[in-house]
Image (cartoon, rainbow, N blue to C red):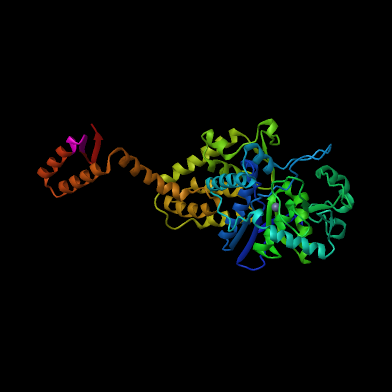
Amino acid sequence: MLKLYNTLTRQIEDFKPLNPPNVGIYTCGPTVYREVHIGNFRTYLLSDFLRRILEYNGYKVTLIKNITDVGHMRQVGHGHHAVQIDPIIKEALDQGKTPLQIAEHYTKLFLEDEKKLNILKATVYPKATEHIKEMIEMISMLLKKGLAYETDGTIYFDVKKFKDYGKLSGNTLDKMDKLLKAVRISVETDKKDSVDFALWKQAEKGRLMKWDSPWGEGFPGWHIECSAMSMKYLGNIFDIHTGGEDLIFPHHEDEIAQSEGATGCKFINYWLHGGYLLVDNKKMSRSKRNVYTIADLEHRKFDALSFRYLTMMTHYRTKMNFTFDALSSAQIALNRLREEIANWDKPKIGCAEYEQRFLESINDDLNMPEALAIVWELVNSDYPTSAKAESLFRFDKVLGLNLAQVKSSSRFNRDKVKSLEIPEKIMGMVKEREGLRRQKRYHLADQLRNKIKKMGYNVQDTERGSKVRKI
Ligand SMILES: [Zn+2]
């Protein structure tokens, strides 16, 4: 039985899907205005391990990961107020491109990085810009139910009307005033209460990204995007929602308020949140120049999969401290694993004992560090390599280290390297000559050897067949 830590109940629970064997997962995806960093990828790896573990347990997973390509912030600052300038629009203006060109470029890079990390493709990657209609519909519903109000083309969620507010984060209304002043730096002074948040914002003059709505030209808030898109693809209620722990408040708290406010029923059964990633024990920040991307790791000659391996060494809810020393250790371990496998026999019957323990570990709230320890116990065990291979390739459905591919590609690469040095035509003649020799037609074989020599290649006969070398 799979057990998961549920942020909503703050305890480890048995996982019971709504419609077995189907499981729906929604993962908050990237805002695409620059390269996604390794801290975000730690979160996406969490949802990938979760999805693979569910599939390992026989479930059929639908995984939705949104692409935030709508700028949710103001394009320019207003007067004296400190305003966060919208990053997508800013990047577009800086580069002389449209916001959609920026979004497309970084979406492509994001998907390439996911592939390098062997993160399985989401069932759908819905884009916010393609779901404005669904967001408007949901906002209209909230207005109709009296849970939202309009002020001058901007729509706010009326937090005090939603009695369950705070159930995920613990930031209940009485604790909130102070907190919200810290997180919502806002020029919107027209709301009824400082705790209210925007569902739709009226477009400022000259804004690049804006859409028509019943309340005039504007753009959606960030939270409404995830409510509208998750429900469109997974239904009003679904099994699991994941994200980084920084999203618990206000983003996920607001998602619950919007979704449960609109439908009147429970939104999500299990909330899973990944811990922070620190770099050299410090928070990542551009000013400290310690924000790393997958490309940065590759420039330093690391394999992207070494980062995947590294994330498995820390439990997903624990703070992870990234250092290049730690990444080197992960890379060395991964290389050793690949080298071991290269000499193993073909997979046959696996090791039941290890398979049982591996399953127990991954089902214990995704205990990947323990699962990895079991992998190494298996590798170092006295079982025949055919049994180790069978079990390890099975485990790799969860680990996602492409181990079976490594095994076949090491063979593939050896053949490829040989044939790369020698033109195909020559290799064809060498093979033909080997055939003649097998038939003991040595005279013809010698003639062919001379012909090959004239073309610039020496053939030498050895115990293991012919060796060809360029003269
Ligand atoms: Zn989200």
Asked if residue 346 is positioned above or below residue 97 in the image, the reply reads below
Relative depth, front residue between 74 and 39: 74
Residue 459 falls inside the magenta stretch: yes
The quadrant of the rendering that contains the N terminus is bottom right
Relative depth, front residue between 310 and 111: 111
Q: Which residues are magenta?
A: 452-460
Q: Could you tell me if residue 1 is visible in this image? A: no
- In the figure, residue 280 lies in which quadrant? top right
- In the figure, residue 347 lies in which quadrant? bottom left
> Image point 78% across, 62% down: which residue?
140
Q: Could you tell me if residue 404 is visible in this image? A: yes
Q: Position of residue 94 (x, y in %)?
A: 65, 37
Relative depth, front residue between 98 and 457: 98
> Image point 73% across, 43% down: which residue?
75
The quadrant of the rendering that contains the C terminus is top left
Asked if residue 80 is positioned above or below residue 141 in the image, the reply reads above
